[in-house]
Image (tube, rainbow, N blue to C red):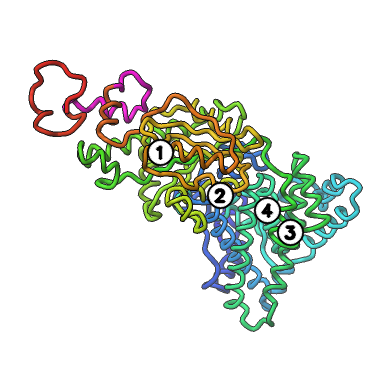
Amino acid sequence: GGASARVRGRPASAAERARMAACREACPELIPLALPPEESPGALVTLADHRCSASLLGVACGEAQLGVADAVVAHKLGGRLAEMHFCSVLFASHPARAAALRAEPPAADHHDRHHSHGPQGALYGELLAQAGASRACRRAIAACRLRAATIREAFVHGDLRPANVLVDPASGEVELQQLGQAALGPSGMDLGALFAGLVAAGPRGVALAIDAWRAFHGRIGALWAVGRPGEPPGAAADWLASVWADAMRFAGCGLLRLDTPAARMVGGLLLSDPPACPDALRAAARNVAPERPRVKLYMVAKFPKLGKCKTRLAATIGDEAALSFARSCVADLVDRFGGPELEAAMASGAGVARSILFSPAEDAGPYRAWLAECCPARGSHWQLEPMRASANAASAAGRLGAVLGAALADAVAEGYAAAAFIGMDSPELSVAQVARAFDAAQDHGRRGAWLAPAGDGGYVLLAIGAGLADPEAAFYDVAWSTPAAFATQAMALQVAGAAVRFGDPPLPDVDDIESFDALAARAHEIALGPRLAGFLASRSPAQGSSPTADSAAPAAAPQPTER
């Protein structure tokens, strides 16, 4: 069970330390040695700080984003739970320890004693009162109480919640808090308590719970072959089926305890008719959703590296200046759109998730470190997502269209009401314009779209609602990197069934020396981010463009731009 040196905030007793040592000695090759939270390496945040469960169980927390995808966190979480539970099951099943384990309190007694629910059975009595007249639900609650009191197959936390799960924002590594509170009970008890919290967070939380279960299932299969090689065929599958059934019923109990009517309704469904598989859980939980819609903002921006960014501009102003320009643009946009101002500006009141689409994937570490250094306040609000392209869309949409189409399809699958795309080279784009685009995309039954043109025939902002029948089709046959990009994108949206509205007037994007010089000439008239404004101010007029002999020669008369 536990590897923590502390129990409920106090030092572990001699007996508890002896039990921990026995666990380690029994299965040294399997049991991961966890550190107490105060000794854990890295900047760890709880899953309650992860955006998908920001409102979970009434926990008030920020909209913090992890630097890794949900699927990575789910995979690590499921594997970690599998290791902890399987190792404790292996330990608990050892014949020589049976007598000692019988002296341990059952999970039901431990839960009532340590979680302030009064005398034994009080918690389940409350649940029976909330279950109302549903006989199936009441029978399931009674069965959960009986299993918690009589099944002693694993050390369980008893009330594991997302707030007890620590995640490294950079790598997605997972650790569990308060492991010293372990008591004996059914393995599905912990999973059920955790799943209840995730399901209550809405569609994204449900997806994380399902992915975590699949990782748990796969890791158990691998551990079973090592730890129980003599078991008959199908033993692992039977045990997993039992754990899943327990997890669904205990999740139902956890949801019944919440104040949200929708959560209690789903809790009753899980108890009276437990889902037989993860997909059935997704269907049962479809009525639990955040009270306000959520939208997703993507910024398409590779990690700016020397000699690898703004190459057309770098040919004139040099690689160092082009790097400074690109990094100034990215950092200013991260701060501009990474705070609560965007949510406040939207009429729909939607919450915003933020991601940076980048490539190659191996730049994730340096990118995250740079964001933490240059944007300490809001860099963590952005998730880094490597660009990927769906195979079926690549030929019709081109490489960039396939990337944008895959991102839009992912946002729709995760339950977002709309998604918007911006680039890193449109420094004049404002919070008000992006908010207006999100609101327009949610119109017409979430089949709206907003397209803001650029001065060179491209576009600087695109927002699309989640109601399109085929999201990837919104990017078919777009003439990328040509003056016809805006017009062909508008046509693709209309063919895909979107009701398109257009931003006005066109905004400049900075790709070459002409657009760079135009921006520099207007810098004192427009609202630029502090980094870009400082970069432009630090350059003399002669540095604004090509470092040629003409620019070095004295001018006979003042000129707006020297080339």
Q: Are marks 2 and 1 in contact (CB under 8 Å)?
A: no
Spatial distance from mark 2 to mark 1, Cα to Cα?
A: 27 Å
* Earlier-in-chain disc, 4 versus 2: 4
Q: Nearer the viewer, mark 4 or mark 1?
A: 1
Q: Is residue 312 above or below residue 340?
A: below
Q: Position of residue 137 (x, y in %)?
A: 85, 53
The secondary element bearing badge 4 is classed as helix
Residue 509, picture quadrant? top left
- Looking at the image, tell me whether mark 4 or mark 1 is earlier in sequence order: 4
Q: Alpha-carbon distance for marks 4 and 1?
A: 49 Å
Count all numbered tags in the image, as a single digit.
4
Q: Amino acid at mark 1?
A: Ala
Task: Check disc 2 and report its element: helix, strand or loop.
Answer: helix
Using the rendered image of the protein, determine whether residue 453 is visible from the camera's viewpoint: yes
**Would residue 174 be visible to someone looking at this image?**
no
Disc 3: which residue: 107
The residue where tag 1 is placed is: 484
- Amino acid at dot 2: Asp
Q: Examine the structure image and report whether residue 393 is included in the region drawn in magenta.
A: no
Instruction: Name the residue furthest top.
Output: 557
Q: In front: 220, or 416?
A: 416
Residue that badge 2 annotates: 410
State the extent of the magenta-drawn residues as a range: 522-542
Whether 424 is drawn above or below 157: the answer is above
The label number, if any, that marks residue 137 in the structure image: none
Q: Which residue is mark 4?
A: 195
Q: Label 2: few (<14), some or many (≥20) within 10 Å? A: some
Tell me residue 392's x, y (percent).
Answer: 52, 57
Mark 3 burial class by Cα count in 10 Å: few <14, some 14-19, many 20+? many
Q: Is residue 205 left or right of residue 245?
A: left
Q: Is residue 534 magenta?
A: yes
Nearer the camera: disc 4 or disc 2: 2
